[in-house]
Every structure is written in structure tokens, then in C-alpha cells.
Image (tube, grey):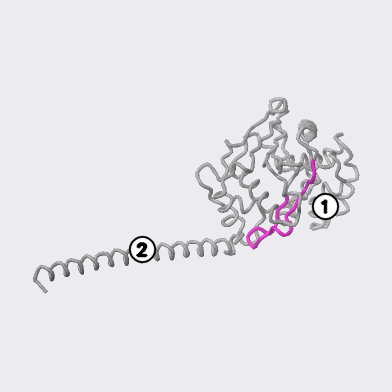
Amino acid sequence: MTSMAVKIRRREHRRQKRVERVQAKRYREERERRERAQLERANRHISLLSPKVVGCPVMRRVKSIKQPYGGYIPSRTLAATVLGDGDETLSPDGDVSAILIGIAVDYLTRLLSGSSAEESFDISLRGAWIVGEAGYASSLLSEVRGLDDVSVRNAIRLAGYDVCFRAGPRGYKPVEDIWPDDATIGNVRTMVGRALAFLEQYGPKTVDGFTFEGGYTDVIVAGDGDFLTEDTLWDFKVSKRRPTSQHTLQLLVYWRMGLHSVHPEFQPIKYLGIFNPRLNTAYRIPVADIPQAVIDEVEQQVIGYW
């Protein structure tokens, strides 16, 4: 073999070695990337199932999530429809909390749109039973018949029992100490009227007070929503402000848990919506506009479907 042939052979050998080293490096980097991804997924799963988050109701879980900038569903992507006069025509609120007002508006709307009193105030009655006041709660409920002053006042008082069921009796304050003034009663009456008009336009309702049997996980073990109409999952809010990213994430969680549940009513849902009877405004987004990557991430990292 000539010296030239030897040189060529050596160069070819060195070139082949370089190619093999590059290929080995690429293979090693790809393997390390896959291992890091597997470790990250495992860590997320461990985080989801840690004692701090296991057994959360929906809203506690939603509030614990650090969302991407703007939120998984930015609130600005919801189309807003103003249905009439808003907060400017309501009186200044008294000393009754906005939470109780919102619950009373929700439950009175359920009652006056066709549900029974017991169904409409089911959570309140359960809470009253927990603190040993089932009899008093029943007497309050027996006088809830419409939107007269006594009915509205009793509905607000009954709302005070919800905390016992949702968070335990530690947060309970005696409902007989709840004394809504005339302005608060008038505001609730007006907002329920707006809610009923809203259901006339967007309804009728198909379900209210829906739950997610079959859709709960080790992470989210409780939660219930407000209303379904034929094609929309609705949540009621009585805030003085537009919906937030927490509100839109709550809707997304409800929808996905509903689809995983045993209830077929969630299958036709095409929109997620918020109705705010204080602002008298409906907000909606088509579910087709929600990126699949967002849905997948929320199902895995927020709800805990693995």
C-alpha cells in the first residue's frame, strides 16, 4: 500500500471517528433531554399529589395555581354583551358580604326558574345540619316564596350556612345576626330579576347546581357549578369588576371535569360563560377557541388527570 493510500485511509478513519463522536453526543443529549422531561413530569405529578393540594375543592385549587401571564384563558378573550342597566342603578351595599349576596342571588334564581326550594338551597340546608340548626334553616326556607322582603332576607340568612358545608363550621357566624338593610334587599331583588331575564334570553336552563361525579380526582374532590343551558356552562358572579383569570380557569376546570363525569349534559357544551347580574353583562367564549395545549395542561397540572 502506497504512502498516499495510507494517508487517505487514516483521514477517512479520523473522519469516521468524528462522525461517530458527533452522533454519540447527539444521542447522549437527546437521552438527557428525555430524562429531564420525564423527571419534570414526575415532579409535577408529585406536586399535584402533595398533602398541600390533595382533596381541594375547585376554587381552592384554582386560587393556588400560578397561571401563565394573562391566564390560561385571558379574560379579554370573552365577548361581553350588556343586557341593560348595570351597577350604576343599584344602591350602595350595606354591611352584608358580597359572597352572601352572590349566593342569595344564585339560589333565588334557581328557585324562581323552576327548581324546588329544597333543591335550590340544598348546600345551605346541609351546612345548617352540620351546625345543628337544620330546624331553624327549614323555618327560614318555608318563608322563601319569591322576591318579597321576607323571602330575600331569609335567602341571605340561609346563604350564611353555606360556609359550614364548603369550609367547615369554624367560619360560621350565627345567621340570626345577619340583618340586610332595605338597600341590600332591593339590590338582591333587582339582580335576581336581571338573572331571570338573562335566562329568558339565553336559556332555558337545563341543569342548576351541577356536580361532577365520575370527574373528581385525588387533587379536586369537591365542587359544584351554577347553571347549564343547552350549549353553555354558566357561572354567576356579582363582582363590580370584569371577570378575572381565576374566573375563567374555574370555568375551564368545570367544563373538563363535566366531560369526564357521568353526566351527559356536559357533552353538548359549546361555550363557557359568566353572567354578572350586578353589571347585567354576559361574557362568553367558544370552547373551540381554547387551544388544545391549554386544555391538556389544565387537565394534567390543575385537575390531575394522568
Residue 122 versus residue 45 in the image, above or below: above
Give the side of residue 44 with respect to residue 85, left or right: left
Q: Measure how far apart labels 2 and 1 are at the Cα level.
A: 60 Å
Q: Earlier in the sequence, mark 2 or mark 1?
A: 2
Q: Amino acid at mark 2?
A: Glu
Tell me the crowding category of disc 1: few under 14, some 14 to 19, or many 20 or more residues within 10 angstroms, Cα based: many
| Residue type at tag 1 | Leu
Q: Which residue is mark 2?
A: 29
Q: Secondary structure at mark 1?
A: helix
**What is the x, y in percent for residue 11?**
17, 66
In screen coordinates, is 245 left or right of 37? right
- Choose top left, top right, bottom left or bottom right for residue 132: bottom right
Q: Which residue in the structure is indicated by mark 1?
A: 125
Residue, x 86% and y 41% (percent of image)? Answer: 114
State the residue in front, 95 or 204: 204
Is the N terminus in the top left, top right, bottom left or bottom right quadrant?
A: bottom left
Which residue ends up furthest to the left in the rendered image?
3
- SS assignment at label 2: helix
Quarter in which the C terminus is drawn:
bottom right
147 magenta-colored = no
Which residue ends up furthest to the bottom in the rendered image? 1
Report the span colored magenta.
Answer: 205-224
Q: Given this view, does label 2 or label 1 mark the residue nearer the observer?
A: 2
Q: Which residue is pictured at 62% across the width and 54% down the height?
A: 61
Percent x, y of residue 19:
27, 64
* Image position of 216 with respect to 109: above or below: below
The residue under the point 81% across, 55% down is 126
Image-quadrant location for residue 49: bottom right
Magenta span: predominant SS is loop
Residue 8 coordinates in the image, percent (x, y):
15, 67
